[in-house]
């Protein structure tokens, strides 16, 4: 068997090896049907059972209360940047945003295309190194919802605790840290996430939303852009991304087998501590981007002390089998994306490589 790469890609990202092996075994014969799941009708009993089981796994693992829909859509989180205001931002209301990175900025700009949107707090002036302090931020009286991005992949900044919004719906883009830790879903009115970080391959987007938000969308919207279309049809209004849903089902089962979200969070803390420790003990050779209280457990962003060392580091890391460590093109530097499926051994290997590289260069 070919040695697996140390995969730190930001997305599409690492998948559990056992999931890939199961998918390979069932590739041509899903549950004794004599067909791949990619070949069968989404109207078949087998696929409908898979669809419902995957929704049920989500509800159990994430502790989703009654009164919420679980939808499997397409178009990625970027489409949700538009669907949320199209469905939930009526005339005369304002969408409020917390902006602490590239993705929350994009969500805010998209909302402005469909109605009134304001930023109530931002960490842009400090270089997006933290989640902004919300203690002095006030929501407009006519706020339709408050939107947050739970984890910024490019800057490596993550919410630890979420704001209390009272009667104002709290909307969260959780594309890069969904199911990485236990959360109280009841605090949120709508959560959305692209699958390609922690849930499976690209192609499917999960929306978890209160019934009252999705049951009646504005009548003027195109059919496919209405939440109530998909809610009324159990995410089967049109042909779904069936293979992506299937892999997501296997990933959810894997999370369950790893001790659920409590077990996954414990693993994530242990493995990312190795890399953060290598940064903190380097005496400035490695410099973390995010302020310590806001460091992400999903995306570890850092620079080296000079550009020559940085180029040499990335080149040596690539030669040693580490994949995806180059920072996003918009900010440069280095980034290790340590999503759920990235094993402890990969993080330990990277930490040791960082120690060795520093010793050789200093």
Image: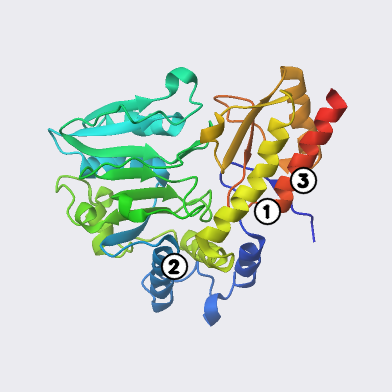
What x and y, as percent, mark residue 115? Answer: 21, 31
Which element is circle 2 on?
helix
The circle on residue 343 is 1
> Based on the displayed image, in which of its 4 quarters is residue 59 positioned?
bottom left
Residue 236, given in percent of the width and then of the height, sits at 33, 64
Front one among 219 and 306: 306
Q: Can you tell which mark lies on residue 349?
A: 3
Q: Answer yes or no: do the residues labelled 2 and 3 have beta carbons within 8 Å?
A: no
Q: Residue at x 53, y 48 (%)?
A: 197
Q: What coloring was used for the rendering?
A: rainbow
Residue drawn 44% across and 67% down? Answer: 57
Which badge, 1 or 2, is on the more N-terminal residue? 2
The residue lying at 34 percent from left, 40 percent from top is 163
Residues at marks 1 and 3, CA–CA distance in whole angstroms: 10 Å
Asked if 44 appears above or below 163 in the picture, the reply is below
Tell me if label 1 and label 2 are in contact, CB under 8 Å.
no
Q: Residue 36, can we see it?
A: yes
Disc nearer the start of the sequence (2/3): 2
Label 1 Cα crowd, 10 Å radius (few <14 / some 14-19 / many 20+): some
The local crowd at label 3, few if under 14, some if 14 to 19, many if 20 or more residues have their Cα within 10 Å, is: some
Q: Residue furthest front?
A: 135
- Crowd around label 2: few <14 · some 14–19 · many ≥20 (10 Å): some
Q: Which residue, as the protein is rendered here, is positioned at the far bottom?
A: 32
Secondary structure type for disc 1: loop
Real-space Cα separation, disc 1 to disc 2, in angstroms: 22 Å
Q: Is residue 247 visible?
A: no
Asked if 293 appears above or below 6 in the picture, the reply is above
Residue that carries the numbered disc 2 in the rendered image = 57
In the rendered image, residue 96, in percent from the top left (x then y), is placed at: 27, 32
How far apart in space, not on screen, are marks 2 and 3 (Cα)? Answer: 32 Å
77 lies above or below 247: above
């Amino acid at each position: 068997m070919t040695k697996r790469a140390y995969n730190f890609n930001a997305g599409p990202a690492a998948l559990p090896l056992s999931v890939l092996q199961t998918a390979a075994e069932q590739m041509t014969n899903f549950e004794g049907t004599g067909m791949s799941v990619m070949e069968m009708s989404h109207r078949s009993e087998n696929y409908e059972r898979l669809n419902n089981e995957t929704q049920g796994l989500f509800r159990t693992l994430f502790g989703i209360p009654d009164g919420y829909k679980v939808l499997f859509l397409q178009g990625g989180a970027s489409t949700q940047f538009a669907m949320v205001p199209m469905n939930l931002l009526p005339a005369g209301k304002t969408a409020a945003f917390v902006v602490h990175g590239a993705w929350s900025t994009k969500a805010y700009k998209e909302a402005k295309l469909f109605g009134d949107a304001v930023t109530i707090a931002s960490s842009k002036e400090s270089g997006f190194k933290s989640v902004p302090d919300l203690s002095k931020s006030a929501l407009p009286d006519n706020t339709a919802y408050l939107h947050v991005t739970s984890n910024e992949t490019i800057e490596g900044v993550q919410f630890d605790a979420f704001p209390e919004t009272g009667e104002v719906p709290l909307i969260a883009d959780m594309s890069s840290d969904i199911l990485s830790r236990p959360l109280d879903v009841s605090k949120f009115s709508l959560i959305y996430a692209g699958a390609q970080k922690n849930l499976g391959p690209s192609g499917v987007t999960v929306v978890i939303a209160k019934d009252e938000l999705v049951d009646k969308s504005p009548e003027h919207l195109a059919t496919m852009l209405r939440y109530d279309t998909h809610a009324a049809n159990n995410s089967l209004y049109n042909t779904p991304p069936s293979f992506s849903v299937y892999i997501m089902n296997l990933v959810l089962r894997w999370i369950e087998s790893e001790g659920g979200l409590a077990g996954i969070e414990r693993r994530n803390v242990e493995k990312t501590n190795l890399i953060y420790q290598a940064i903190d003990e380097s005496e400035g050779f490695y410099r973390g981007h995010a302020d310590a209280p806001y460091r992400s457990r999903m995306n570890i962003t850092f620079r080296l002390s000079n550009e020559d060392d940085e180029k040499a580091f990335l080149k040596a890391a690539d030669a040693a089998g580490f994949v995806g460590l180059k920072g996003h093109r918009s900010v440069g530097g280095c980034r290790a994306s340590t999503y759920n499926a990235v094993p402890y051994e990969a993080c330990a290997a990277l930490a040791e490589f960082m120690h060795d590289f520093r010793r050789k260069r200093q």
